[in-house]
Image: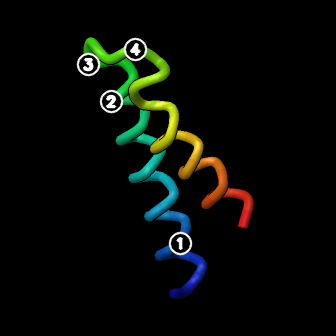
């Protein structure tokens, strides 16, 4: 993947996480694992 594709993927993943957090009635312990996965992905 080139840098542009990676940046788009990162943006899409963060937008998805924001929607998950804001638009659902899930508690933080129900969506923490996907969000932690995004954080790990960002730092790799």
Q: Residue at x 60, y 78 (%)?
A: 3
Task: Name the side, left or right, on which 29 lies relative to 44.
Answer: left
Picture coordinates of residue 12 (x, y %)?
A: 39, 53
Image vertical order of residue 17 relative to residue 2, above or below: above
Q: Nearer the viewer, residue 21 or 2?
A: 21
What element does badge 4 sit on? loop
Give the mark nearest the N terminus, 1 or 2. 1
Q: CA distance from mark 2 to mark 4?
A: 14 Å
Q: Which residue is mark 3?
A: 24
Give the mark nearest the N terminus, 1 or 3. 1
Picture coordinates of residue 30 (x, y %)?
A: 40, 26
Q: Which residue is mark 1?
A: 6
Q: Which residue is mark 4?
A: 27
Q: Residue at x 63, y 48 (%)?
A: 39
Q: Are marks 2 and 4 in contact (CB under 8 Å)?
A: no
Task: Name the side, left or right, on which 36 lies relative to 19.
Answer: right
Q: Quadrant of residue 36?
A: top right
Give the farthest residue toward the bottom.
1
Q: Are marks 3 and 2 in contact (CB under 8 Å)?
A: no
What element does badge 2 sit on? helix
The nearer-to-camera label among 3 and 4 is 4
Q: Residue at x 51, y 32 (%)?
A: 32
Q: Which residue is mark 2?
A: 19
Q: CA distance from mark 3 to mark 4?
A: 9 Å
Q: CA distance from mark 1 to mark 2?
A: 20 Å
Mark carried by residue 44? none
Task: Check disc 1: other Cα within 10 Å, few if <14, some if 14-19, many if 20+.
Answer: few
Q: CA distance from mark 3 to mark 2?
A: 8 Å
What element does badge 3 sit on? loop
Q: CA distance from mark 1 to mark 4?
A: 29 Å
The nearer-to-camera label among 1 and 4 is 4
Colour convention of the picture: rainbow
């Amino acid at each position: 993947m080139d840098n542009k594709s990676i940046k788009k993927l990162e943006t899409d993943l963060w937008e998805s996480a924001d929607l998950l957090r804001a638009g659902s009635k899930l508690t933080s312990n129900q969506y923490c694992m996907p969000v932690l996965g995004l954080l790990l992905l960002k730092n790799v």
